[in-house]
Amino acid sequence: MTSNYYDHYDGSKLFLFLSSKIGLPIDLVNFLIAQLAALCVARLFRKPLKLASPEFRHSLCLVIGLLMGYFCFGKQAVHLSVLPMLSYTLLKSGPQHLMGNITLTASMLYLSCLHVHRQLYHTGDYTLDITGPLMVITQRVTSLAYSLQDTLTKKEINANSMGPSSEKDQSRMVKIPSPLEYFSYTLAFQTLMCGPVVFYTDYITFIEGDVVNENQKNISEDRKEPSPRLAVLYKVAGSVAAAVLYLSLAKKYPLTALEELTDPTSEVARSWSVLYLLWYAYLSTLVVRCKYYHAWLLSEAICNNSGMGFNGYDNDGCPKWDKMSNIDVFGFEFAQNFRDAVASWNKNTNAWLRNVAYERGGAAWRTARVYALSALWHGFHPGYYLTFFAGGLFTIAAKKVRAFARPMFLESRPKKLVYDALTFMTTRVAMTYATVPFVLLHLSPSLAFYGRLHYSLHFIALGAIFLPAKTSTRNSSQNYTDLPPTSSKFKEVPIKDVNGELNGNLKIS
């Protein structure tokens, strides 16, 4: 580590000796220590503090979140408080029919300023920075603002999406939360560091302790309080496995090899075939995804261990602890189409994008709005915009290809198996092709990568958009919308959308 690295990092250096001993950057060491501590503390909310007053539970979530923020980010943690303060002031003073739009504009401007600052001064210095938690806070304050805007102005985004519990959820949003409720929600320690975004109705349900009562009306007395123990162990084990896989492969498939494409004399540019380049790009992006799997699964385990994320019982009467699930690892890695892969990644962010972008404004520009907001939310590196442009293009093209080609393979089981195999391989190639600029971040290596492949998938997708529509397949494909459906974490609106961040920096949101 260089002196510049430590100079830029404002978090605690108490465990610098451990960082030197195990060879991990101090910021990642602090992140792991904070998350493991949160995993242990979260248990208190299920047993000793289960019957504590909502005010006490709010206060404890807030205090622990502030301590974690200061431990990991030092003086930069002031931004964790400034953004919620700004948003709360706007909620209290702004017009009701515009509070969502105003909050989104202000929070995105604030977040964008920090993105620009980091990009100009701290790129590459450390892997964990304040913009990660601020991205999650931005999701929380804007989703709450739009929920209030819709409720207070008597607007429903999609009345057909309301479920049996929607009336109760709506009743909780008839007024602006108190300062304690608001700041506890935005700075709760369970999801402060890397998400997932928790929507306000779910958080209040957790604090007030009635989630079990809502989901167990037909459950026998001896099963009134389902234990998350197995779910927590499963997710911790998955998090550890992802970390081990990352440590095992990171040095074998570094992203720096792809950056050598900018040099025509390098071995990568001269001797690597297109197939090997795609294979290497797939493995290097897989290594990066393992960092996200590790962090997201650990964060979900923290939520479950505190009693957050219970989602009722399945048909066999087994408790489900998947309400805070942000990633379906196998769903993403083995998806048979681009839509399912995107729907399995960063699912709660998909829900947020659905609420604040997809359902706002005219239908003609829904997909464009979603990808534009997602790119802006991530920052200003050119690689983000190349990835989201490709993602939007592939989303539209995949819809046309599926409607045109799929009926040809449904005549027999062998043909269907061939179709499944082709779509599986195509999805792996398309996802790798689209996300390489995201992990490279910069324009030159990203364009060099696309140039080495002759921008082939861009041209194929553009051609697919002009495929003729088949009216005979309308019924079979009418549910294939521009944006993939995800799990219904946010009860006020249906959840369908796209997003994902795969860069090498641990900015997980």
Image (tube, helix red, strand yellow):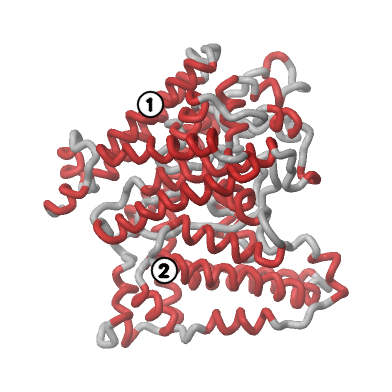
Front-lying residue, 342 or 74: 74
Mark 1 surroundings: few (<14), some (14-19) or many (≥20) residues within 10 A: some
> Left or right: 272 with respect to 278?
left
**What residue would you read off at disc 1?**
64
Give the residue at x 70% y 83%.
466
> Which SS class for mark 1?
helix
Mark 2 residue type: Gly
Between the residue at mark 1 and the residue at mark 2, the CA separation in whole angstroms equals 35 Å
Measured as percent of width and height from the top left, residue 412 is found at: 81, 72
Give the residue at x 61% y 26%.
205
Up/down of 99 relative to 190, above or below = below
**What residue would you read off at disc 2?**
383
Mark 1 residue type: Ile
Residue ranking furthest to the left: 3
Give the residue at x 68% y 15%.
222
Give the residue at x 80% y 46%.
160
> Left or right: 134 with respect to 52?
left
> Which SS class for mark 2?
helix
Q: Earlier in the sequence, mark 1 or mark 2?
A: 1
